[in-house]
Amino acid sequence: MLEARLDQAQNFALVDEGLYVTSSAKLQYYDFATARLTPLIPIPGGDFGLTVSPDGRSILYSQSERESGSLMLVENFR
């Protein structure tokens, strides 16, 4: 499962001890020392990229929300 998400750079963030990866609408961490993939948090709305701060204390990821719009007809507008 991990290999499937490494095909696009926006799906993972490399750190010294492992790899953060988005997969199946959740953020996961792959630890190089243990070779374990650990689910961390759900990412509702999909997974569209992430990055980790240089000190490793913050993670920024993007997600999409429901898209909608309204159409209004105004007749005799001046």
Image: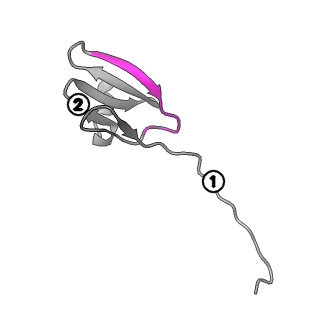
Residue 15, numbered label: 2
Q: Secondary structure at mark 1?
A: loop
| Mark toward the viewer: 1 or 2 | 2
| 23 to 78, vertically: above or below | above
Quarter the N terminus occupies: top left
| 24 to 76, vertically: above or below | above
Instruction: Find residue 8 and report its horizontal and vertical position in percent.
Output: 29, 40
Q: Which residue is mark 1?
A: 68
Decide which of tag 1 and tag 2 comes sooner along the chain.
2
Q: Are marks 1 and 2 in contact (CB under 8 Å)?
A: no
Q: Amino acid at mark 2?
A: Val
Asked if the magenta segment contains residue 41, the reply would be yes
Q: Is residue 47 left or right of residue 16?
A: right
Residue 32, numbered label: none
Q: Amino acid at mark 1?
A: Ser
For image coordinates 21% across by 19% down, the residue present is 32
Q: Could you say which is closer to the camera, residue 77 or residue 60?
A: 60
**Residues in magenta, as a range:** 36-47
Q: CA distance from mark 1 to mark 2?
A: 37 Å
Instruction: Find residue 9 and report its horizontal and vertical position in percent.
Output: 27, 41
For image coordinates 76% across by 87% down, the residue present is 78
Q: Secondary structure at mark 2?
A: loop
Asked if the magenta segment contains residue 42, the reply would be yes
For image coordinates 74% across by 68% down, the residue present is 72
What is the crowding at mark 1: few (fewer than 14 residues within 10 Å), some, or many (at least 20)?
Answer: few
Single out the residue that lies furthest toward the top: 34
- Quarter of image, res 7: top left
